[in-house]
Image (cartoon, rainbow, N blue to C red):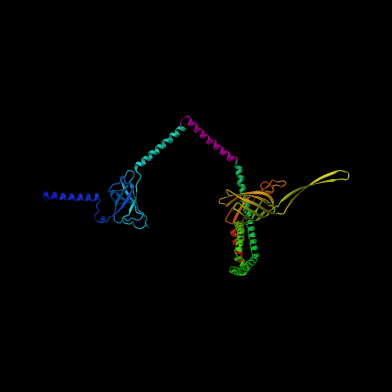
Amino acid sequence: MSPTARLGAFLLAALVILGVFIVKIEEIPIGAKGDRTRVQAAFPSVAGLDAKSPVRIAGVRVGLVEKIELDGARALVTLVLDAGIGLRQGATAEVTSLGMLGDKYVELYPGPLDAPALQPGTVLVGVSPVAFDQVLKTANDMGGDLREVTASLRKSLGGDEGQRRIDEILENIRQLTADTREMVRANRENVDATVANFRSFSDTLKTELPRLAEKLNEMADRIDGVVAENRGNLNDSLANIKDLSGRLRVSADNLNDITGKINRGEGSIGKLINDETTVDNLNNTLKSVESGVASLKNTIGRAERWKLDMNVRSEALPSIEENGSRSTFGLDLHTTDKRFFRLELVNSPVGRRRTTTEVVTTIFPDGRSETTSRTTVRSTDASSVNAQVGYHLPHDLSVRAGLFESTGGVGVDKALLGRKLRLSLEAYDFNRDTQPPHLRLEGRYYLTRNLFAYTGWDDPTWSKGSSVLFGGGVSWGDEDLKYLLGTAGSFGN
C-alpha cells in the first residue's frame, strides 16, 4: 500500500473514532434510542444542574437534561427520556445529587401505578434541594445559639458559686431520695391495709351482685304485671276517645249549620250580629276573650315545657344484718331549666329510730320518794318519703332541700364526664337523739341512657348504722314513658 493510501486509511479511522466519541459524548440518539420522549418540569431553582445532566428513576438513568431556560421567576427544564418510559398523572421531579458533593441530576417520580397516563404538554412540578449555603447558614445560627447556651451555663455554674449550687442540687436530690424511702417505709402498712380492704370489698361484691340482679328481675316482673293488669283500662280509654271524637264531629256539623244561618242574617242572633252596633260590641268582647286565651295559652305552654323523669333503683347494704337493702321509686318534675321537684317512696332497711327517756317518781306513805328512769328505743315504719325542691346551678352543680326519708335535709349533686357520672352528698335527720346527722355519699354512673349503677357510703358517722352501698336502677324520661304507653296500647289492640 502506498504511503498516500496508508495516510488516507489512518485519517478515515481517526474520523470514525472521532464520530463515535461525538455520538457518545453528545448522546446523539441513534437506532432504538431515536424514539425518545420529551417532558418539561418547572423548578424554583436548579443551581448546579447543567445541560446533559442525567435523569434517573429509582437511581436508574433513563434520560438527560436537554436544555434549561428561564420562565419568569422559575427555571423550565426540558427532559429527554428513553423510549418506553411512561409517566402518569401525579408525576413529579426533584433536583438532587449523588452524595453530599456529587454531581446534580434530576430524579423523576413517575406517579401512582393506578393513575392514568400523563397528558402531552403537561409541565411537571419540580422540587429544588436545600442549598448548601442555607445549610451552612443554619449550622452557623445553631452554633451561635449553642455558644449562648454554653456561655449561660458557664456563668451560672462556673467558679466557686457554681460549684456551691451543684453541691446544693446534689444534696437536695440525696435528701429527697432519703425522704421518699422513709415515706414508703412508714406507709407500707397503710398500703397493705388498703389493698386488703379492696380485696374484701371485691369478695362482698361477688356475693351481693347476684342478689341485686335477682331483685332487679323481680322488679321488672312486677312492672310487667302492672302493665298487663291495666291493659283493659287502656283499651277502654281508647274506645271512649273514639266515641268522644265521633260526638265532636256531629257537634261541629251542627255548629257549622248554625253559623251559616247567622251569616245569612236568619233568626234573632243573625239580625243582631248584622247590626253594626252589635258587631262593635261583639268585637270588643272578642278582644277581651282573645287576651284571656293568650294568657291561657302561655300558661299551657309552660306546662307543656315541663319534663318528667321516673326512676326505680335498689341497693344493697352489706353491713346491716337485718334487711340490708333499700329500694326507691321516684319522680323528678322539671318545671323550668333551673328548677325541679323530686317525689320518691323509699323502703328503708331500719326506718327511723327515736329514743325516749321516761322519769317516774314514786312517793310512799311514810313520805319517802323514789325516782326511776326508763329509756325506750322505738323504730318507726321503714317506708318513708323524699319530697324535695332542687335548683340547677352553673358548672353542672345542683342543690336540693326538703324531706329526705321523711326528715328535713339538704343535698348537693355534681355531674362529670358529660353527665355520665354524678356525685351526690346528702345530710338529713339533724335531730337524732344520740347520733350526728345522717350522711349519704353516692357516686352514680350511667351505663346506658336508661340503666345506671352506683356505689357509696351510707351513714358514715354512726358506727352501728354505717355501711357501704352498691346497687343499680333504671330511669325513664318523657320519650321513654310515651313509648311504654304506646306499646301498652298496641298490646291492648
The residue at the point 28 percent across, 47 percent down is 50
Q: Is residue 226 visible?
A: yes
Residue 82, x across and y down, in percent: 29, 54
Q: Nearer the viewer, residue 77 or 371?
A: 77
Kindly indicate the quadrant of the structure image that contains residue 281: bottom right
| Residue 163 within the magenta-colored segment of the rendering | yes
Total numbered badges shown on the rendered structure: 0
Residue 366 position in % (x across, y down)? 88, 44
Q: Residue at x 13, y 49 (%)?
A: 7
Q: Quadrant of residue 85?
A: bottom left
Q: Nearer the viewer, residue 406 or 284?
A: 284
Establish if 483 lies above or below 368.
below
Quadrant holding the C terminus: bottom right
Residue 119 in percent (x, y) is at: 33, 57
Q: Is residue 485 visible?
A: no
- Decide: is 237 above or below 62: below
Residue 249 sits in quarter: bottom right
Q: What is the span of residues highlighted in magenta in the rendered image?
A: 158-186
- The residue at the far right in this view is 366
Residue placed furthest toward the top: 160
Q: Report whether 116 appears left or right of 413.
A: left
Within the magenta stretch, is there residue 275?
no
Residue 262: x and y in percent read 60, 68
**Residue at position x 22%, y 49% in the image:** 22
- Between 402 and 221, which is closer to the camera in this rendering? 402
State the predominant SS element of the stretch in magenta.
helix
**Would you say 426 lies left or right of 37 here?**
right
Q: In front here: 21 or 44?
A: 44
